[in-house]
């Protein structure tokens, strides 16, 4: 497989549009912003995978899609699907809607169905964008999806995107990322709110540790 700055030019099983966006992203983020992400080899090459990362900027899903050689599916706020043209575009790139203001059972069920089909799901466990350098609290829903699906959970720490746009001005921060090994949740055998909270806590701690290694 041909790679540029360790980023694959074509992933496995992705659409032409997904590959086209990848070709735009690699020179933009890898070149202009000198984005370098280590540890992508931790991603399983087949079967269901749940990738988690903090959400610091609009471009985070694009960069995550650039890093891995498998297409990502990810939740996006339902407001982005109001316009049909925009909805068609982001859907073709892997997005599906979630109502953040309510317990969106349909989105959670959809996420579990995707993992059941062996797809790769990107999740932002904080629930919304956090434009700072820390790691916010993780919602227990991400723990529920991890435990109920049984999919490997891969953390991705990405730093710098929160500084790409400040006070309406573009910046040129160096983007750095690190992909960690699967988070061990195997000893959590119950399926209740306490178990989901514990799984979310472990994911949070793994992400904090990953950022400390950047």
Image: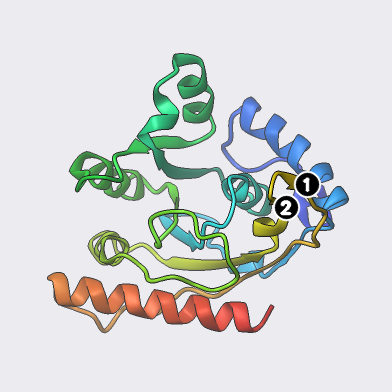
Q: Residue at x 52, y 80 (%)?
A: 208
The residue indicated by pointer 1 is 170
Snapshot colouring: rainbow
Q: CA distance from mark 1 to mark 2?
A: 6 Å
Q: Residue at x 49, y 72 (%)?
A: 135
Q: Secondary structure at mark 1?
A: strand
160 lies above or below 203: above
Residue 34: give x, y in percent of width and height: 84, 57
In the visual, does 143 lie left or right of 191? right
In the visual, does 59 lie left or right of 7? left
Crowd band around label 1 with a 10 angstrom C-alpha radius: few (<14), some (14–19), many (20+): few
Residue farthest top in this picture: 84
| Of 46 and 206, the residue lying toward us | 206
Q: Secondary structure at mark 2?
A: loop
In the visual, does 124 lie left or right of 193? right
Q: Is residue 191 visible?
A: no
Query: Mark 1–mark 2 contact, CB under 8 Å?
Result: yes
Q: Residue at x 66, y 83 (%)?
A: 213
Residue farthest front in this picture: 167
| Of 102 and 87, the residue lying toward us | 102
Residue 167: give x, y in percent of width and height: 68, 49
Q: Is residue 152 visible?
A: yes
Residue 192: give x, y in percent of width and height: 12, 70
181 lies above or below 152: below
Crowd band around label 2 with a 10 angstrom C-alpha radius: few (<14), some (14–19), many (20+): some
Residue 153: give x, y in percent of width and height: 43, 67
14 lies above or below 169: above
Q: Residue at x 40, y 62 (%)?
A: 126
Task: Tell me, for residue 164, which label it has, or none.
Answer: 2
Say which quarter of the image contains residue 161: bottom right
- For the image shown, how many numbered marks are present on the structure? 2
């Amino acid at each position: 497989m041909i790679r540029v700055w360790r980023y694959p030019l074509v992933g496995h099983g992705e659409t032409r549009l997904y590959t086209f966006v990848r070709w735009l992203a690699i020179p933009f983020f890898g070149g202009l912003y000198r984005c370098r992400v280590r540890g992508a080899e931790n991603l399983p090459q087949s079967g269901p995978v749940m990738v988690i990362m903090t959400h610091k900027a609009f471009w985070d899903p694009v960069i995550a899609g650039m890093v891995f050689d498998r297409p990502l599916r990810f939740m996006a706020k339902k407001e982005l699907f109001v316009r049909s043209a925009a909805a068609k575009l982001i859907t073709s790139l892997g997005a599906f809607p979630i109502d953040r203001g309510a317990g969106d059972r349909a989105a959670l069920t959809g996420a579990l169905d995707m993992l059941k089909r062996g797809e790769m799901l990107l999740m932002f466990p904080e629930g919304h964008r956090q434009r700072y350098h820390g790691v916010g609290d993780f919602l227990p829903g991400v723990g529920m999806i991890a435990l109920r699906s049984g999919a490997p959970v891969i953390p991705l720490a990405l730093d710098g995107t929160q500084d790409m746009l400040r006070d309406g001005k573009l910046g040129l921060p160096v983007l750095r990322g690190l992909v960690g090994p699967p988070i061990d949740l195997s000893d959590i055998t119950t399926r209740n709110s306490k178990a989901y909270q514990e799984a979310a806590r472990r994911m949070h701690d793994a992400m904090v540790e990953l950022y400390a290694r950047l």
